[in-house]
Image: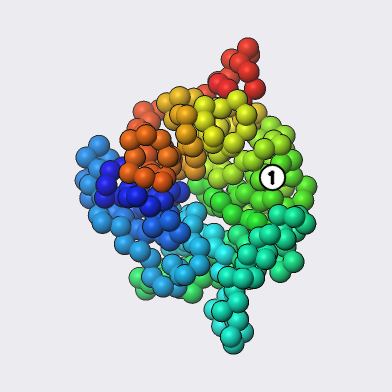
Amino acid sequence: MGPVINTSHREAEATFTADGRTMYFNCDDYDICISQLTGTWARGQWTTPQLLGARVSTAYLEVEPWITPAGDKLYFNSNRPFDDGDSLPGLSMYVDTLGLITTVTTDRLGFSLFGGLGEDELWVSRLVDGAWSEPGNLDDVGGEPPINTSFADHCLAFSADGNEAYWTSNRPGGLGGDDIWTSRRVDGKWTSAENLGANVNGPRGEHHSIPTPDGRALYVSSNRTGGFGGEDIYVSTREPNGRWGRLVNAGPSVNGPGNDRCGAWTSDGSVFLFDSDRVGGFGSKDIWWVQVKAFHPPVEPASAPEGHM
């Protein structure tokens, strides 16, 4: 996407409003920025990215944004410890240490001793009179899907109609380190979290699952064996019965020898984006894009080895 968007820092995880011209993304390694498209995609005229205000971008980690089509709600992953007003006097000086302890104990024990303190959790902020509200932990906000646990829960995405949620978690009941989970809104209520199963999840790691605008396919990042690089983007196509089919590698038009991950779509399905550390970038991870004339999920040949198209 060029030097206006990409720098020597980590730029990744793009998400768009319905018009495809307002982009939120992970910038400056662990913050969230916004940029506007003023020309055509081909010309790439993006405004200088602006860091979101202090309520969203803090000294903690804020990554993996997801903006609603209307642009009125922003979901993101953060390791911030508390909702606004819930912190205890003098605790802030110990948060980094507690976060490190939590990371180590979670890795060794398989669960968090601190109920998610310092770990990946999902937060949401609303746009009110042109400013982002104080984010709330998803568990504390009415009407949101039941996602956060004492394990790492992150990489949230929604279907175009907002009634299906997909995210990544290492909670019990999965098939690997990170798995894709889902919940559906039925009659105004979200169903219990459900693992997408062995067609999508495997013994390695799957994360950042992005549905296509038409809901026919799910694009998933994975480090499973048999790909083109360390991480590749794979595709699952929805079967007639509504279940997700076996993951298929998206192929060399997207994947290369490095790490290619975290897909994103403009709402009309005309542009597919992903982040990559491939040669030709500006350093760390950069955002790349490809024009899509018509959406056709890849089809896996019967003789292909596991994990390939």
Residue shown at the point (71%, 69%) measured from the top left: 114
Q: Is residue 252 left or right of residue 2?
A: right
| Quadrant housing residue 256 | top left
In the picture, measured across the screen, residue 171 lies left or right of residue 268, that is right
Q: Amino acid at mark 1?
A: Gly
Tell me: 52 left or right of 126: left
Is residue 202 visible to the viewer in this orientation of the structure? yes
Q: Position of residue 217 (x, y in %)?
A: 55, 34
The quarter of the image holding the C terminus is top right
Q: Is residue 58 left or right of residue 244?
A: left
* Residue drawn at x 52%, y 24% as measured from the top left: 298
User: Quick one: 178 or 244, which is closer to the camera?
Assistant: 178
In front: 16, or 121?
121
Q: Is residue 214 visible?
A: no
Residue 309 in the image: above or below residue 148:
above
Q: What colouring method underlies this structural image?
A: rainbow
Q: Which residue is mark 1?
A: 177
Q: On screen, 148 above or below 291?
A: below
> Depth check: 209 or 117 in front?
117
Quadrant of the rendering where the N terminus is positioned: top left
Q: Position of residue 299 (x, y in %)?
A: 55, 20
Does dot 1 land on a helix, a strand or a loop? loop
Q: Residues within 10 Å of mark 1 (few under 14, many from 20)?
A: some
